[in-house]
Amino acid sequence: MFKLFVLALTIVFASAKLGGDIADSVKTVANFRCLKQHLSFVIFRAYRSLGSLDPTAIPNIQHAYAAGFRDIDIYIFPCFKCGNPRNQVRTTVNALKGQPYHWIWLDVERHRWGSKEANRRFLAEMFDEAPKHGKPVGIYTSSAEWSKVVGNDWNAGARFKLWWPRWNNKKTLRDFRPFAGWRSCYIKQYFNERKACNIEFDCNY
């Protein structure tokens, strides 16, 4: 099964950029060197919904870079109950100062949020703060998640690029369905929970 999966990744890799988002334990340079044969970009969780930095982010960024990855992003999973959304962004950016990453992605999905009105105020502050740190900013969400958290009539996130999950195992952006002001997606998370080279990741195109 693993050999078939790796072969499939290798075949598609020749004509498209494939990536993985990772919230796993610290992995070695050798692990990432193996993964680099099949994926061209990685996205690491840097801030957890518990309200703290992910301690695996910095070593994994460094190990991935040492293995040859140059397309490295991070994502922030906000903690609503912790409050102070601006500080959650600042804490993450300050901790990663000097690390070789590019994009900051803000993860918006159902997980212990408040009312839609309170969620909108929280995210509005986060959306205002994130671009101030010299990195491009995007949002990870789907129509279903966005609708539950803030409502699809709120389009404040549409000025940012969209990382869109749709687990249909199809490596295409053409099946995107517009919502909340977004007309297209920048990245599609097309499948979840794969494992290769001793690294667990979700699959992105």
Image (tube, rainbow, N blue to C red):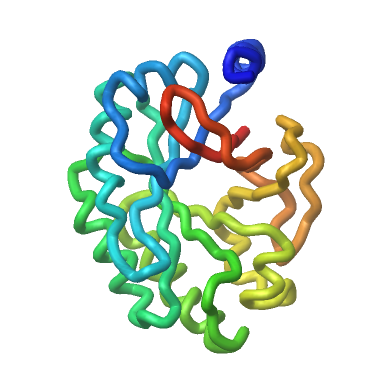
Where 96 falls versus 153 (above or below)? above
Q: Is residue 116 left or right of residue 34?
A: right
Q: Residue at x 33, y 65 (%)?
A: 89
Q: Position of residue 113 (x, y in %)?
A: 54, 79
Where 121 falls versus 86 (above or below)? below
Q: Position of residue 132 (x, y in %)?
A: 33, 62
Q: Is residue 21 left or right of residue 48?
A: right
Q: Position of residue 145 (x, y in %)?
A: 66, 66
Q: Residue at x 37, y 69 (%)?
A: 50
Q: Who is closer to the viewer here, 94 or 145? A: 145
Q: Who is closer to the viewer here, 135 or 79? A: 79
In the rendered image, the quadrant that contains the N terminus is top right
* Count of marks overlaid on the render: 0
Quadrant of residue 199 in the image?
Answer: top left
Q: Position of residue 160 (x, y in %)?
A: 55, 56
Q: Residue at x 80, y 52 (%)?
A: 177
Quadrant of residue 70 in the image?
Answer: top left
In this view, the residue farthest toward the front is: 1
Q: Residue at x 63, y 77 (%)?
A: 150
In the rendered image, the quadrant that contains the C terminus is top right
Where 8 falls versus 176 (above or below)? above
